[in-house]
Image (spheres, rainbow, N blue to C red):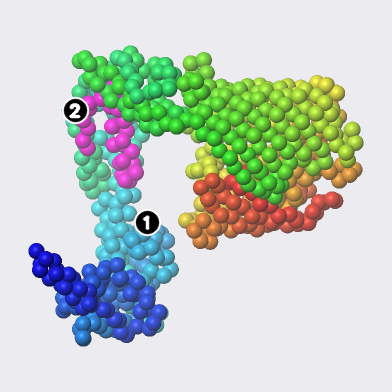
Amino acid sequence: MRLHFIALCISLYSMVLHAAEIQIHGLDARENERFMDAIKPKLQFITSRPATSWRADDAAFQLHRVILRRGFPDSEVNPQISKGVIHLHVTKGAQFYFGKISTSSRTTLSDELLIDYFYQPIIQSEAVPKSKAPFIQEYVDAGVKNIENYLKSIGYWNAQVQLVSAQRQNETQTVDVAVEIQQGRRHSISPPHYQGAPADTQQSLSQTCAEWVGKPATSANLKAIVAAVNNYFYTEGYHFAKVKSDITHSTTHTQITFRINQGLRFKTRSIQITGYQDTKPRKIKRFYDGVEGTTYDAERIDKATSSLLQSGVFRRASITPKQVGEDLLDLHIAVEEAKTVTTSAYIGTDSYEGGILGLSYTDLNFFGNMWNLSARGEWTGRGLLGEVGITEPFFAGEQVSFNVRNFVLRRSPDGYSKLEAGLELSWTWSPIEKFNTRLYLGGSTVSTTSSTMTDEELGPKDYINSRIGLRSQLDLRDDPIMPYHGYNGELLTEFGSINGDADTTYFKVDVSNSYRFTLGPEHHLISRFDLGIISPQDSSKLPIDRRFFSGGSNSVRAVKERTLGPRSISGDPLGGQSYWVGSAEYVRQIKGPIFTSVFYDLGQVYESAKDLDFSEPTQTLGIGARVHLPIGPIRFEYGYNLDPKPREARGAFHFSIGASF
């Protein structure tokens, strides 16, 4: 046994001692290092064992493959073994890139689309830019096939695309590709056939699919019509329905045949919930109100489960329908509770607030009622905020969230300081995805002081503000934290009263709109327009902290935060009863999460609502840099004032975190 072990050790030592070394010849030092790094992971087996002819051939094959994929179609790699060393002799030849992609055929494809779909396979597989795509023979056929597949996907199902030539241009070291396209006629969707379905079901399905009949037989339309048929059974209680689809293409039409075994139509008898520990089961069951005793609607139940998970109380929830009668189902909902109590601290800074330090506490399942309790304390260079709130997600048995919030705020904007304490009740309703509306009723006591403003400029110092308002939001952006595309709009209307040092009422409207649209994978545009008007019964009795302020990182960026518009005798911003802001911004990706921007802002704040005018705004031209992080973009921006008004700055620098408007 010992002799076998010694022999094994000697054998292993001999293998290590005689492990193959690989040397590359015919490349400069930089290329040598680059290609060795590329093939090193694939040569670990070869370099850990003695050199043999087949291992030398394998090393040559791996190196040649890498060189070919760098665009050297005439390259050769010849292996040779000398004294245990594998020598790879390289003849590179000229390096070529893909050049012009063209066709002389009549086609609906634009030149840009033709080029894009030819290059798509090599860009996705090799991660190279279109302008520097190395010539690799296999991607000629892949690009031609990809053009053909694209034509079929948009309804030209008889399309054929063939390679005409791949011509080398030695002067420019490019390969020009010419293709022939036989596009054929675009298919339209014929009325589907429904095999195996009863007459009443066929009639319902015909109505469901009517909107696609006669439309182009694109891949998107065909997927949509198949999904619509499956969804019909999904929502109409046919839990065990089986649907298969066959698609055939003729000269000009596409026919879909559905083979259907719909089975029985089920009703939901009862809902049983398991897995909860701290949560009261009746609080979970509210999400499924109206399900028992009705036709089994899987889509409705999925949406209810999605809402349940969005509460954050549960880590997961699974639904198992179980047949308990000829046409009855019981729903078994198994849940697993998540950690619902969190305490966190945060720290930050921006160019207006200065330092920011905060502490928050959250309980998503307060007393097992799925109430969301939140408390927060925050200190900034401008003041202190303390607030506590509790939210009930189902108010009066409806999917309307009800929130009670208490807060105390001490704040020192430029020119004055204030202390405010208040209570607010609010109801939020989201009838459809991406839209919500919030009704609020609140009251607060406010005390303001200033050492630089007159009493007339400051307005009432000690007062009670009672208010009722409605805020609606339509958010169609692709991402609320890091948006690149889509519309976002908000409308606020508020009626309030001021009672104390002075008595008055007011009506307020504030509208904000922004739209983002992508110009390509690396750049996009942002546009916005905001407008606000507050109309008090007596303008002289409107407190300073109920007025509009504008300017800063999310407004006109040539001026500091809240400094746009009227000023006091001492030069402090006074705010106003009306304002507007417009902006256009171009954002381009530099590398990874780093972006740069160029923007143009304009707008103004006016002392009274009747002064609202668009003729002489403050105008800004600026540049910015931003770093996109999971918490949102970190923005560095400088705005230059094109035509400063009296007391306005020539420009301003801003640092902030979060998406601009």
Q: Which of the two discs, 1 and 2, sits closer to the camera? A: 2
Disc 2 element? strand
Residue count near mark 2 (Cα–Cα under 10 Å), binned few <14, some 14–19, many ≥20: some
> In front: 165, or 568?
568
Can residue 231 be found in the magenta stretch?
yes
Coordinates of residue 89 in the picture (x, y in percent): 27, 84
Tag 1 residue: 108
Q: Is residue 309 in view?
A: no
Q: Position of residue 291 (x, y in %)?
A: 36, 18
* Residue at the farthest front position: 2
Q: Secondary structure at mark 1?
A: loop
| Label 1 – label 2 distance at C-alpha | 41 Å
Q: Residue at x 68, y 39 (%)?
A: 379
Residue 591 is at least partly visible in this image? yes
Residue at image point 27% right, 38% down: 190
How far across and how far down the image is residue 268, in percent?
Answer: 30, 17
257 over 291 or under it: above or below: below
Q: Is the residue 646 above or below the residue 91 in the image?
A: above
Image-quadrant location for residue 35: bottom left
Q: Is residue 322 magenta?
A: no
Closer to us: 104 or 537: 537
Say whether disc 1 or disc 2 marks the residue closer to the N-terminus: 1
Quarter of the image with the N terminus is: bottom left
- At x 78%, y 48%, the residue is 616
Residue type for callout 1: Thr
- For the C terminus, the quadrant is top right
Q: Which mark is residue 261?
A: 2
Image spot of residue 623 (x, y percent): 65, 58
Q: Amino acid at mark 2?
A: Asn
Residues 492 and 161: in front is 492
Which range is magenta? 216-245
Q: Quadrant of residue 452?
A: top right
